[in-house]
Amino acid sequence: MGELRHADGASDGPDDHAHHEPRVGWLLLLPVIGLLLVAPPALGSFTADQSGTLPAAAESDYGPLPEGDPVPVGLLDYASRSIYDDGRSLAGRRLELTGFLSIGPDGGPMLARIVVSCCAADGRPIKVGLRGGPVIDVPGGTWVRVTGRHSTQRAKDPVNQADIAYLEVEQWQPITPPKQQYE
């Protein structure tokens, strides 16, 4: 059989060997595999210290808190009720808040949690300042449960100028980080 020759001199004959490109395409999978095997660390006090607090939700009507003494309240709910309801729905109640410790604009302790809307990449902290009560002497990032009452004190977050609500601390205790660390 004859060989078929192209205008550029190349042939399609039996002695022609296919040109093999380097097979390095599989190397593109290494970063993906690495991300699957090594989970990023949970967002925590470093994120809270470096990011502005999430503005509290501006809801107009706050229903009564559930029964209990103290009543567990999420940080975002507490901040929203404190700032937008002027604490009316919190008045006269002992409250229990859970989060990790962070440093406030005045160097004092703050309670924080990361609020995630979609994924960890959009996580933003909600911060509540802590005042009064026994001295909180554990390092930043430590998870604590704080019991206290609403405080009318407020501050501005130096990162984004959002209002920060405060809690008048009665007692606190370190806790094991919860399984669901995001709010």
Image (cartoon, grey):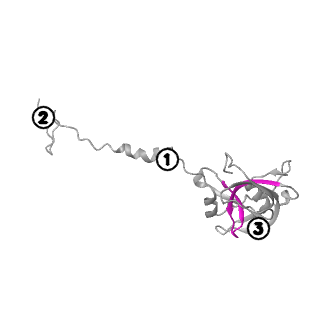
Quadrant position of the N terminus in the picture: top left
Q: Which residue is mark 2?
A: 3
x, y percentage for residue 23? 31, 42
- Report the Cα–Cα distance between label 1 and label 2: 51 Å
x, y percentage for residue 95? 82, 54
Q: Provide the secondary structure element on which disc 2 rests.
A: loop
Q: Which residue is mark 1?
A: 35
Q: Quadrant of residue 46?
A: bottom right
Type of residue at label 3?
Arg
Q: Provide the secondary structure element on which disc 1 rests.
A: helix
* Mark sitting on residue 154: 3
Task: Please state the extent of the stretch shown in magenta in the rendering.
Answer: 95-114
Q: Is residue 5 above or below residue 39?
A: above
- The residue depicted at 65 percent of the width and 57 percent of the height is 141
Mark 3 and 2 residues: CB-CB less than 8 Å, in contact? no
- Residue 132 visible in the picture: yes
Whether residue 105 sits left or right of residue 24 in the image: it is right
x, y percentage for residue 173? 76, 54
Q: Residue furthest left?
A: 2
* Residue count near mark 1 (Cα–Cα under 10 Å), binned few <14, some 14–19, many ≥20: few
Q: Quadrant of residue 133?
A: bottom right
Dot placed on the residue nearer the N-terminal end, 1 or 2? 2
Specify whether residue 101 is painted magenta: yes
* Residue count near mark 3 (Cα–Cα under 10 Å), binned few <14, some 14–19, many ≥20: some
Q: Provide the secondary structure element on which disc 3 rests.
A: strand
Type of residue at label 1?
Leu
Magenta stretch: helix, strand or loop mostly: strand
